[in-house]
Amino acid sequence: MKTVKLSDITLREIGKARAAALSFKERVEIARTLDRLQVDAIELPPIRDEKADVLSNKTIATVVSSARLSAAVGLTEESVATAWESVKAARDPALHVMVPVSPVQMEYLCHKKGPAVLELVKALVAKARYYTEHVEFSALDATRAEGEFLDQVLATAVASGAQAVTLCDSAGVMTPDECAAFLTDVQARVPGLERVELGVELGNAMRMASACAAAAIDAGAAVVKTAVIDLDVPTTEDFAAYLQVKGEAKGLRCRLRTTELARSAAQLGWLLQSERSSGSPFDSGVRENASGICLTAGDDISEVGKVVRHLGYDLTEEDNAKVYEAFRRIAEKKPFISAREMDAIVASTALQVPSTYRMVNYVITCGNAVSAMASVTLEKDGKAVTEVRAGDGPIDAAFLAIEQAVGHHYELDDFQIQTVTEGREAMGSALVKLRSGGKVYSGTGISTDVIGASIRAYVSALNKIVYEEV
C-alpha cells in the first residue's frame, strides 16, 4: 500500500480568504484541531510581524504533537533564521521555501529575472538546510513556467539540499490528464527528483483540483496540499472521500482520522467564516481559567514568575518584583492563590502608567426587543470623543465604541467578571486582557455596575498599551 501524505495549508493561506487576520487563539485552535485529525503536516505562513508571529508559531509548536510543523520562509536569507527560531521547538519542525518560477510571477513577486531567481533558490534552500534536513521547496506557478528554466530551478533546489519538492498549478488551469502528463515529464527530465518527496499544490479554478490530485498520485506524487475549508485547493474532505472509495482498489491509504473529519471541518468552517465577526472584540473568545495553577505562600519569586509567564504576561524585572510583593501580602492571608487572583494581582500592580485616555461617561441601551447600543465618551489631552456602536450585548457594544474612539482594534485575550462584596449594592470587579504586538496587557475596574467596571478595565489595559508603544 502506498501512503499518501496530506499537508494542510489552512493556516498558511487563510489570510487570502478573509479580510481580518486570524487572532492568536484562532491560530492555536486550528493547529490543535488539525493535529488531532492527524494530517501529516501543518503549514505556517511567512513571518510578517516578527514579535507576534514568532510568539504564535512558538505556541503552536507546543500544542502540535503528531504532525510536522512547516514554517514558510520569506524571500530573504534573514527570514530563514526567523522562521526556524519560531518552530525549532516543535516535535518535527521543517522549513518551506516558496519561490515563483513563471515569468509573470517572478517579475511581479520577486522583481527578478531567471538567473537571479536561480541564485535566490540556491541561497534560500542552502540556508534552510543549514538549520534542518527537513526542507521543502515549492515551485510556485510551475505549470506556466518555461520548461528548461523549471528544470534548472528544481535541479538547483535538490542539489542545495531540499528533501521535498512541490509543483504548483497556482492558476488551476490543468485537467487531470494534463496534470499527470506534466508530472511524468518533469520527473523524466530532472535528475535527482526520484530521491526527494514529490508533492503537488493544485488550484481549483475549474473545480477539478481533487481530480487532478488523484491523477498526480497515479503519476508518482506522494504529497497533496489540502485545506479544511475552500481555499482554492482540494478540500481535505473531498480528497479523503476519494481515498476512502478508491484507496483499496488503487493500493492507497492515508493516516487521516476520517471519523472526526466532518465534525472538525464544520467546527473550523464556522470559526473561519469571515461574515460572522463584524470586528467584535469577542470574536476570538476568551481564555478559560488556567486550570491546575495554585500558588501558596511557600512559592518563591521564580515560581511566581513562571505562572505569570504562563498566563501570557511578559513583565520587566521591576514589575515581576512588584507582583511578587503583592502576591506575598495576599498569600499570607489565604491558603492558596488561583490563576484568576494572579491575573488581578498583575493587572493592579504591574505597569502602572499615567492615564492617556479617561472614561468620561457612558450610556447603554439594551433589552430583549432591541439591539444593544453603547455611547461612550473618552477624554484624551483635554479633548472628548464620543462614539456610538451596536453590539451583541451591552459590553460588546461598549468595547466596540471604545475601539471606534481610539481608532484601533486590539485582540481580547481574556475577560472576567466577579463580585467583590455581597448584597444589593454589591461591587463588581472586571478584568480585561488585551493582546498587542504579541504581548498581553491587563486592566481592572470596580463598580456597582458590571458594565461600568468592564469599561474601566478596558480603558486601564488600553492606557498600558498606549504608554508602552508610543
Image: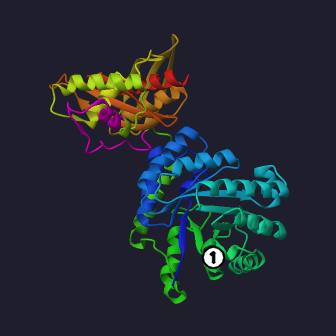
Q: Note whether 386 is above or below 21 in the view shown.
A: above
Residue 206 shows in this picture: yes
Residue 348 shows in this picture: no
Q: Amino acid at mark 1?
A: Ala
Q: Is residue 21 left or right of residue 364?
A: right
Q: Which residue is mark 1?
A: 221
Q: Note whether 263 is above or below 373 in the view shown.
A: below
What main secondary structure does the magenta stretch of the protein show?
loop
Q: Position of residue 7 (x, y in %)?
A: 55, 65
Q: Position of residue 239 (x, y in %)?
A: 54, 74
Q: Residue furthest top?
A: 382
* Residue drawn 46% across the image and 58% down it: 91
Q: Which residues are magenta?
A: 282-308
* Residue drawn 66% across the image and 64% down it: 162
Q: Position of residue 62 (x, y in %)?
A: 42, 52
Q: Is residue 385 left or right of residue 426?
A: right
